[in-house]
Image (spheres, grey):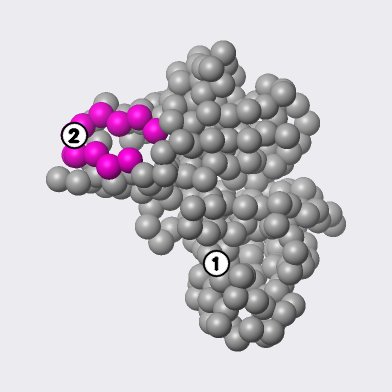
Amino acid sequence: AQSVTQLDSQVPVFEEAPVELRCNYSSSVSVYLFWYVQYPNQGLQLLLKYLSGSTLVESINGFEAEFNKSQTSFHLRKPSVHISDTAEYFCAVTPRSGYSTLTFGKGTMLLVSP
Amino acid sequence: NAGVTQTPKFQVLKTGQSMTLQCAQDMNHNSMYWYRQDPGMGLRLIYYSASEGTTDKGEVPNGYNVSRLNKREFSLRLESAAPSQTSVYFCASSGQLGNTIYFGEGSWLTVV
């Protein structure tokens, strides 16, 4: 079985500051990793994913995440946040082999203030 | 392009009443899911359907039933609603299990 830990339930930052949202996972097998974003009163949307290849993956709106196998982490970063980045962010994991459902972390609320 | 559509968006039920949440996807996906989202608990999988004709329990199936009506539609039924089922419910779909999941907009359910 897999598990995902998002250590921070809330991360407050000022606009244009850098941010890191932490995600650690536990799994006995190799995994695929995802970050989803949920804007207020909406469903979740895929932000980025790591399947294979380069361990650094990027999204179209400036977020990036790096897969670190030795530390079993997939932290999400953005060098300069905007007010519009205020949302809840969920990390998720699924095994590479076979077909399985995604396991989600409990989410981190990113609060960007002016 | 509608993606995943779920209805109703809001519903208030009395304890003991029954209701069905409807979900349809137009992406020709094989797999469909029902999640509930509660504050501080993240998303918890209620039931899923890996492919048409199959359904399986997720993490929190008690008090719910599902029907995979066809490839497009996957409904969630509360037979006798309880206040503990007050939540936001999300339907989702993916090409296969483990692929990227696409979510609906959510259904806010309150049981009084």
Q: Which label number is shown at residue B87?
A: 1
Question: In this rendering, is residue A45 above or below A47?
Answer: below
- The residue at the point 58 percent across, 29 percent down is A25
Q: Chain of mark 2?
A: A
Q: Image height check: is B67 above or below A73?
A: below
- Is A105 magenta? The answer is no
| Magenta span: chief secondary structure | strand
Q: Position of residue B44 (x, y in %)?
A: 62, 52
Hey, what amino acid is under mark 2? Glu
Residue B104 visible? The answer is: no
Q: Nearer the viewer, residue A7 or A70?
A: A7
Label 2 to label 1, Cα distance in Å? 34 Å
- Per the rendered image, the range of residues in magenta is A11-21
Which residue has dot 2 on it?
Answer: A16
Q: Quadrant of the N terminus of chain A?
A: top right
Q: Residue at x 49, y 61 (%)?
A: B105
Eye-nearest disc, 2 or 1? 1
User: Which kind of residue does numbered mark 1 sit on?
Assistant: Ser
Q: Residue at x 64, y 84 (%)?
A: B15
**Mark 2 neighbour density, 10 Å: few (under 14) some (14–19) many (20 or more):** some
Same subunit: marks 2 and 1 = no
